[in-house]
Image (cartoon, rainbow, N blue to C red):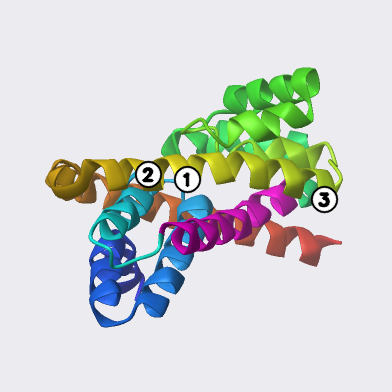
Amino acid sequence: MSLIFLNILTSIPDYISLAVEKNSTIAYLTICLAMFLENVIPPIPSEIIMPLGGFFVYQQKLNFYILVFWGLFGTILGSLPWYYLGRLVNEKKLSNFLDKKGKYLGISSDDLAKSKKWFDKYGVSLVFWGRLIPGIRTLISVPAGIELMPFSKFLIWTTMGSFIWVSLLTYTGYLFGENYSIIETYLDQIKYVVKPILIIIFLYFLVKLLIRFIKNNSN
């Protein structure tokens, strides 16, 4: 079952292309879902999803503004689980977990400490700028939750930063036009890398659920 899900995740661009050919409404919703998953599961690249949508804008199969709206909506929804994870799991427990399992995710407790230090120093502006930096885009939601940043502020700054990111990626795909094959070549190569990373991500969430289950039953 998990392998089937992994194949679905790594074939998202193919599903988007198929959806565009069938119905533009389905295509927008598919891209929204893809951007949601991209934020929940970082190895899925938004750098592929939104430029692909932009390419279809170039072909006049999708509308730029509608596409940006749904891409943004999926991005915002995908940032919420990490924000609430930060609120539910205190820094010490999360840091201990990263010391033990973080190497499988490419994330260490030092990374968490740095993101928290940046958050303490720059506050809400970091949520905005962090959404524009690959690798930090997802993690920045965690210290925002840990520091109990008001949800309304988190939502506003996340939306603003994500809007710029999604718009730029979409416009990049539009500018590439018929040269989009360059991005497609990159996509074919990245598929072989994404699958094993996704397996690790699944193991991470499985361990997380087990820890929470044990904790709840010990109280």
Q: Position of residue 86 (x, y in %)?
A: 73, 45
Q: Earlier in the sequence, mark 3 or mark 1?
A: 3
Q: Indicate the amino acid at tag 3.
A: Phe
Question: For numbered disc 1, what is the local secondary structure?
Answer: helix
Kindly check if marks 3 and 1 are in contact, taking CB atoms under 8 A apart as contact: no
Nearer to me, 100 or 190:
190
Q: Residues within 10 Å of mark 1 (few under 14, many from 20)?
A: many
Q: Quadrant of the C terminus?
A: bottom right
Nearer to me, 208 or 37:
37
Q: Residues within 10 Å of mark 3 (few under 14, many from 20)?
A: few
Q: Quadrant of the N terminus?
A: bottom left
Q: Indicate the amino acid at tag 2.
A: Tyr
Q: Which residue is mark 2?
A: 171
Nearer to me, 46 or 205:
46
Residue at coordinates 28% horizontally, 63% vertically from top-left? 60
Q: Indicate the amino acid at tag 1.
A: Ser
